[in-house]
Amino acid sequence: KQEVTQIPAALSVPEGENLVLNCSFTDSAIYNLQWFRQDPGKGLTSLLLIQSSQREQTSGRLNASLDKSSGRSTLYIAASQPGDSATYLCAAPSGTYKYIFGTGTRLKVLA
Amino acid sequence: EAQVTQNPRYLITVTGKKLTVTCSQNMNHEYMSWYRQDPGLGLRQIYYSMNVEVTDKGDVPEGYKVSRKEKRNFPLILESPSPNQTSLYFCASNLGDEQFFGPGTRLTVL
């Protein structure tokens, strides 16, 4: 059964710092992995979807990588800003139609 | 505008009083699902639907029902809510492998 872990659970960084968020999964037979952002009390916003055939996806200051062999994905945020403060979640498929979410990394970027 | 909508956004109810949370998407997506989010447990999938009249259980289906009579709607039904179903509920629909989420419904069962 797929298990998804995100470490650290919380992170505070000064503005401008580059940072990496980690997502680990136990079943490497995945066909994609998706990263989301969640602001307090709000829904989830899709950030990046990486297919298993890709190793990286980029959107603006965000770059996500996927290494199926090691069961890891990372979300790299360049030049962090206070507006990046949110909880970041990753989700991996479990079988064909189910999805398993990590519990998230709560990021705070200090001005 | 492409979106997933949920109603109501907030609901306080009492134990045993049947309720339905509606979910609708205007993107003609085939796959839809329901999640609940609880502190420390993250998002857990309740039910999903691959298409009209095709539904299946997720990881935490107990106490919930769903139906998919039309492609755009996927209501979540709590026949007899209990306090342990107090949670934040999200509906999602997929374009291919990418999930898009509704704004959430915060349910409190007293």
Image (cartoon, coloured by chain):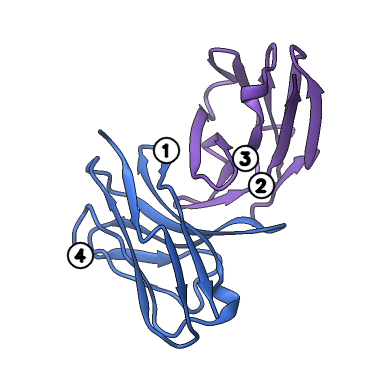
Chain colours: A purple, B blue
Q: In this view, does A16 lie above or below B24?
A: above
Whether callout 2 and callout 1 share a subunit is answered no
Tell me the residue that label 1 is attached to: B97
Q: Distance between the residues labelled 4 and 1?
A: 22 Å
Marks 2,3: beta carbons within 8 A: yes
Marks 2,1: beta carbons within 8 A: no
Disc number for residue B69: 4
Chain letter, disc 4 residue: B
Q: Quadrant of residue B78?
A: bottom left
Q: Which part of the image, by quadrant, shows the N terminus of chain A?
A: bottom right
The nearer-to-camera label among 4 and 1 is 4
**Front in this rendered view, residue B31 or A28:** B31
Label 1: element kind: loop
Label 3: element kind: strand
Q: Where is residue B67 in the image (x, y as percent from the top left)?
A: 29, 69
Q: Residue at x 23, y 43 (%)?
A: B26
Chain letter, disc 1 residue: B
Disc number for residue A89: 3
Marks 4,2: beta carbons within 8 A: no
**Front in this rendered view, residue B55 or A95:** B55
Q: Quadrant of residue B48?
A: bottom left
- The residue type indicated by label 2 comes to Gly
Label 4: element kind: loop
Whether callout 4 and callout 1 share a subunit is answered yes
Q: Residue at x 68, y 13 (%)?
A: A78
Whether callout 4 and callout 2 share a subunit is answered no
Q: Which of marks 4 and 1 is nearer the N terminus?
A: 4
Q: Position of residue A3 (x, y in %)?
A: 68, 52
**Front in this rendered view, residue A6 or A95:** A6
Disc number for residue A102: 2
